[in-house]
Amino acid sequence: MIVTFVDLQDSSNKLNDVPIDKRATLIEILEGMLQQREPFICELLGENKFDLMIGIGPLGCAQYAGPDHDPPISWLLD
């Protein structure tokens, strides 16, 4: 599966709209950002029309929205 990365807090992020097809690549991107950023929110847009919004920081969160447009499912992670 291919996902597209979108940084919701930095529209100038050079990784915005970059397709990612490997788990290792996604982990590398996120770990690299964690080294130099305050907590932030990003989205992974799936080729099957899903949307995963992720809050990354000391207290994380995630929200999944499927292609059927039902209300999203949310989690709070610490």
Image (tube, grey):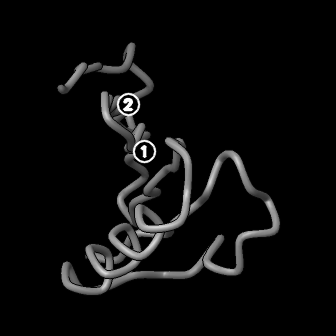
Residue found at x 41% / y 76%: 32
Residue depth check, mark 1 versus mark 2: number of the one nearer the observer: 1
Q: Inspect the image, locate mark 1, and give the three-letter code of the amino acid beneath it.
A: Asp
Q: Is residue 75 left or right of residue 54?
A: left
Structural crowding at the residue carrying mark 1, measured as other residues with C-alpha within 10 Å and reported as few (<14), some (14–19) or many (≥20): some
Disc 1, SS: strand
Disc 2 crowd rating (10 Å Cα; few below 14, some 14-19, many 20+) is few
As drawn, the residue found furthest toward the right would be: 12
Up-down relation of residue 10 to residue 56 (above or below): below
On residue 51, which mark appears? 1
Q: Residue at 31%, 28% (x, y): give it.
A: 59
Q: Is residue 60 above or below residue 38?
A: above
Q: Residue furthest top?
A: 71
Give the position of the C terminus as an image quadrant: top left
> Eyeballing the image, is 19 above or below 75?
below
Residue at figure coordinates x 35%, y 29% from the top left: 63
Give percent across and percent down for residue 29. 40, 77
Q: Amino acid at mark 2?
A: Asp
Q: How many marks?
A: 2
Q: Nearer the viewer, residue 14 or 31?
A: 31
Instruction: Give the residue number, with chain letter if any, for mark 2.
Output: 68
* Earlier sequence position, callout 1 versus callout 2: 1
41 w.r.t. 27: above or below = above
Q: Secondary structure at mark 2?
A: loop
> What x and y, as percent, mark residue 48?
35, 59
Which residue: 36% across, 20% down? 72
